[in-house]
Image: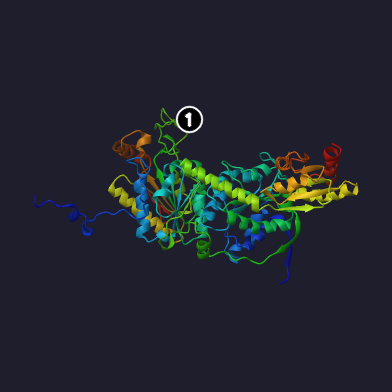
Amino acid sequence: MEDTLVKSEIIKPENRVYKKTDLMTEKVLSYCPGCGHGTAHRIIMEVIEEMGLTEDTIGIAPVGCSVLAYEFMNVDMQQAAHGRAPALATAVKRLMPHKTVFTYQGDGDLAAIGTAETIHAANRGERITIIFINNGIYGMTGGQMAPTTLPGMKSSTSPYGRDLDMMGHPLKITELVAQLPGTHYVTRQAVHTPSNVRKTKKAIRKAFELQHQNVGMTFIEIVSNCNSGWKMTPVQANKWMVDNMFPFYPLGDIKVDGKMVEG
Amino acid sequence: MEKELRLMKGNEAFAEAAIRAGTDGYFGYPITPQSEVMEYLMAEKPHERTGMVVLQAESEVASINMLYGGAGCGKKVMTSSSSPGISLMQEGISYMAGAELPCVILNVVRGGPGLGTIQPSQSDYSQSTKGGGHGDYRLITLAPSSVQEMYDSVKLGYELAFKYRNPVLVLSDGAIGQMMEKVEIDAQVERLSEEQIREQHPWATLGRHNGRERNIITSLDLDPARQERHNEALQRKYKEVEEKEVRYEKINCDDADYIFVAYGTSARICQKSMQLAREKGIKVGLFRPITLFPFPKKELHEMAGQVKGILSVEMSAGQMIEDILLAVEGKVKVEHYGRMGGIIPAPGEVVDALEQKIVKG
């Protein structure tokens, strides 16, 4: 068949529509297929590369599923004790204000064990960017209840559903952080569709730009899925996230230019 | 150049030494009896003097993790606290030991357990010298017994911390922290530039300049074989510290029949006790460890063959005595004398204890 394309005719620079950023290492991701972490990692690294920040960025990895983030993100990284990433980032940025400093934290890390570090770093207006992945569950340890687990939502430590009387309410820490005068830009995004990925990437770029305008903390929540923790297929998990997580954690900007966005 | 002498509290001397030693960042949380450290630093505006960052954190947990972040960038960082606050820091200290990060931590010890008291004590010896947090690690532990030594412990602390990439703990107590003595102030050491740090500490996370491979600061390695090798390397390092960094002082030990072993405030009490005992015809000397880890094991072992008995004097229920017993290997009688709860023993009490427990016993 004469009109069939051969491989060498397809793989040409002018035909390329996507290239993996060099700021993601060759290491195979440790995340479950369908998990949002990989996409979130990639777009952060893409922004750093596109903005030319590679030589002056320090990232802080948390404890949780993304504890090994430093194996995938090809920039200088520190791995923090559980919940303490904002404290590490505070010192890094205060000692070197010209650097770009970000933390990457899950809901257990940021909104349970690290609540004090989160709130106080935000309240001091540390010039750092916090990227907060909220999937409403402890994925790493096998699906236990998180501070952000929805009312009635089942987990291995709330097997009959989250009982608000007994277990307390989900913590909307992003709204809480937005109330503090130290935060300048607070937004909630997702990475489950191409359009959401683009929006989130734009938010990350904005946050990193603001870091060098000396205006305060930038905080991006990414509502994500946990298909293995939620015990669903990736497709079911994304649908469940849209139907259940988004109504409770609505997407969009919460605070822009230091002012609350009118709901 | 003429020497600059000042009359200072131990805590203030430590703070001034911090600025003079070229510290990049101090992160702390107030607690009695060491709050003067941060108060002095804030009043001195070290940001104007040297560019040093001073930050009051929301807790000791945050302070020690700020040290982790700063030390990970190769910066000279320090904190100070007192016993309950140091307990809160143990997780972070363990992480720093695991990630091999240098820093200087001052513990102005007060009596415990729990909230205990704000008065001086030496009951944190075991926590300081045996690890304190989880995992197999050691802190290089310095025990100043004067305001001058508080001052000097900063420079020495950084020297050892960076040489071995390990946290250094300065184990002081409420009496040394609060008392005033004259201090000889040395010249200002310049803070290192980012370029100097890149050169001297190539492991630091300062950003991937000139496209170098990324640096990672972590205590995690999930591969057991690699984690074991990492632990073995740490143990080799501690062994080297034990071989090379022992520091101690001997006073009137040459003709002594008995010796006191004491550090910090207890060593000061024992100097007077020694004088009182000698007036009564009891020939006693003082062996003062300056490093508690590494503990002067060999030196004490040698001393044990030359004397009739050893009295360990410590403001605790008897923690250091375990190290003395291990060092002397049963060659000579060893007893402990101490007071607890924030009480400092009187010199006469110590002499009585020597007579009762060692001379007559």
Judged from this view, the residue extending furthest toward the top is: A160
Relative to B124, residue B146 above or below: below
Percent x, y of residue A239: 30, 38
Please tell me which residue lies in front, A150 or A46.
A46
Q: Residues within 10 Å of mark 1 (few under 14, many from 20)?
A: few
Image quadrant assignment for residue B258: top right
Percent position of residue B270, x then y:
80, 48
**Percent position of residue A112, x then y:** 48, 41
Between A15 and B246, the one nearer to me in the picture: B246
How are the colours assigned in the image?
A: rainbow
Q: SS for tag 1? A: helix
Amino acid type of the residue tagged 1 in the rendering: Met
Q: Residue furthest left?
A: A1
| B300 with respect to B94 (left or right) | right
Question: Which residue is most to the bottom?
Answer: B1
Q: Is residue B95 left or right of residue B13?
A: left
Please give the count of numbered marks on the rendered protein: 1
**Rendered position, A246 above or below A205:** above
Q: Is residue B26 visible?
A: no
Q: Quick check: can you spot residue B79?
A: yes
Side of A20 relative to B203 (left or right): left
Image position of B166 (left or right of A60): right
Of A232 and A206, nearer the camera is A232
Chain designation of label 1: A
Where is mark 1, residue-wise?
A166
Image coordinates for residue B199, horizontal then vertical, percent: 51, 63
Query: Residue reaching furthest right?
Result: B280
